[in-house]
């Protein structure tokens, strides 16, 4: 399992009339945290493009436990739970500055060929990078 | 069960680098469709404020089946599945212009007191409006 | 001069903590209204793609006169002030449901070649469509 | 004159079909940079609330010189040009990782009483903080 933590300060435009972060904006936070996790493994946007891969989200489920407010600094802990075959499943846990879990989510990303726009198996290069990161980490 | 259908034309700013509607933007579409359903029953934002109620989303799960593109006109069918007690559960189904289901989602909203910000039971006025709408509809 | 009017209902996610439409969201409203104006003339996204043209915004200036609120229905009147050479200049005027002008803006779009990403002159087809629309309109 | 620099990494959801940061999203970048400048002077959101002040944007003008791309790290340099009376005028300059100026903007914010929602003069506390920051900086 690979884990990554990202800190984000909530922006003004992300907060709604109720004073809470708009529920639709959490998807962006998970996205940023997934990107950080992949960057750490050595999988950048460029790496994906070179492999003709795009990674659309195919499933997402979210539990909003407590609200997040403007200017809060939140920590998103993202975990890649298993080696990818045709998709990657991530788990996200969001904590506030008091280290209280305020939100939990899962997201699934599919490997899709950028030209045919059809599902594909995870490119070897990417699977290898994940495997070698896990070994190195032990 | 109460059902409502809303048509939305996809905006330019909602589409990402892949040419797809960004996955985080679907939450807005469900929201618009829920608002239309509640408006039809006679539950407006004003109605909620008068009852000191806010309705934050507490759970959401989404299945992205096919992508949506810029300028597409999509139809969001939203259903309120049961009479609300302390929360309302909605089901959403999104179709493209060929009437193909491209997305499915569920969202849960909690009744929260605007002053205490604590969960509360659904106000009578709101439950009554839903009940009378269901009767009228039969 | 070509003029077009578009009605938009303000979405929940577009409103900020102050209860006002977030100032950054007005750009989306102008964009929708420009697209409607171009669609009316017969210039669609497809038309532009066929001509290998993209239309990035190069300048924008906005005067926020009065705020806009959640669920308000606003009218955006957009005018194309002159025949385009290498760019198009639009004027936008936003009115609320009482027909009061609440916002004014100008936006400039450049014709850019989709492949070279360099500025270009407006394609003949597009200039012709605008000219013939103006003639027809007289 | 008070100056502040903020670095931001461009998010995936901020980029449009053309591969450019959507022009409407720049307003968020200026906002973040203004907030950082005010925070540095000791003017936080809390400070403003205690003084019953909100700061809506009343004018904004933008020159988009070169595009910004996904994952780019940009630097927003924001300057407060003069002591505020009833409004504050900021100048923004955005540079890419090669230190090339890619965008310029001005934004004007008005002091508004949070209760009456009417324009007001800048609270003494805020003017004093700006004055003492300028002195300290010399």
Image (cartoon, coloured by chain):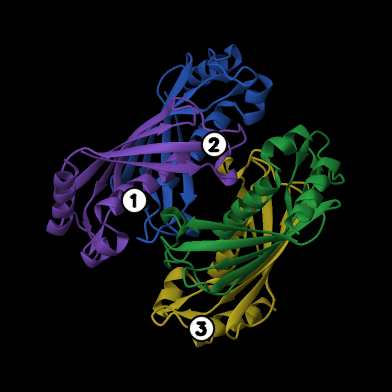
Chain colours: A purple, B blue, C yellow, D green
Residue B61 falls in image quadrant = top left
Q: Residue at image x 47%, y 68%?
A: D97
Residue receiving disc 3: C119
- Which residue is depicted at the point 56% across and 84% down? C127
Q: Quadrant of the C terminus of chain C?
A: bottom right
Say which residue appears at 51% left-offset and 87% top-offset. C124
Tell me: D3 left or right of D114: left
**Which one is nearer the viewer's eye here, D60 or B2?**
D60
Left or right: A97, with A137 as reference point: right
D98 and D138: which is toward the camera: D138
Q: CA distance from mark 1 to mark 2?
A: 21 Å
User: Does dot 3 land on a helix, a strand or a loop?
Assistant: loop
Label 3 crowd bin: few (<14), some (14–19), many (20+), radius 10 Å = some
Residue C25 visible in the snapshot? no
Find residue D49 and report its image quarter: top right
Chain letter of disc 3 in the image = C
Task: Classify mark 1: residues with Cα within 10 Å, few (<14), some (14-19) or many (20+).
Answer: many
| x and y, in percent, of residue A71 in the image | 58, 39
- Tell me residue A87's x, y (percent): 20, 46
Residue that carries the numbered disc 1 in the rendered image: A35
Spot occupied by residue D84 in the image (x, y as percentages of width and height): 82, 53
Dot 2, how many residues are within 10 Å of its Cα: few (below 14), some (14-19), or many (20+)? some
* Residue D6 image offset from top left, x and y in percent: 56, 56
In the structure shown, which secondary structural element does the residue marked by tag 2 occupy?
A: loop
Chain under label 2? A
User: Which of pointers 1 and 3 indicates the residue nearer the eye?
Assistant: 1
Please, is residue D116 above or below residue B51 in the view? below
Q: Is residue C119 visible?
A: yes
**Callout 1 touching callout 2 (CB < 8 Å):** no
- Say whether residue A132 is left or right of residue C119: left
Q: Quadrant of the N terminus of chain C?
A: bottom right
Q: Are marks 1 and 3 in contact (CB under 8 Å)?
A: no
């Amino acid at each position: 399992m690979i884990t990554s933590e990202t800190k984000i300060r909530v922006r003004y435009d992300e907060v709604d009339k109720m004073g809470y972060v708009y529920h639709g904006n959490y998807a962006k936070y998970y996205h940023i945290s997934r990107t950080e996790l992949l960057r750490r493994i050595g999988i950048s946007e460029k790496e994906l493009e070179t492999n003709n891969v795009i990674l659309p989200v195919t499933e997402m489920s979210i539990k909003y436990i407590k609200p997040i407010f403007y200017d809060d600094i939140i920590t998103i802990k993202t975990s890649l739970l298993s080696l990818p075959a045709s998709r990657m499943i991530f788990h996200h846990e969001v904590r506030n500055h008091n280290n209280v879990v305020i939100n939990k989510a899962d997201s699934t990303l599919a490997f899709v060929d950028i030209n045919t726009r059809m599902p594909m198996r995870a490119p070897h290069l990417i699977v290898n990078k994940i495997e070698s990161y896990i070994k190195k980490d032990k």
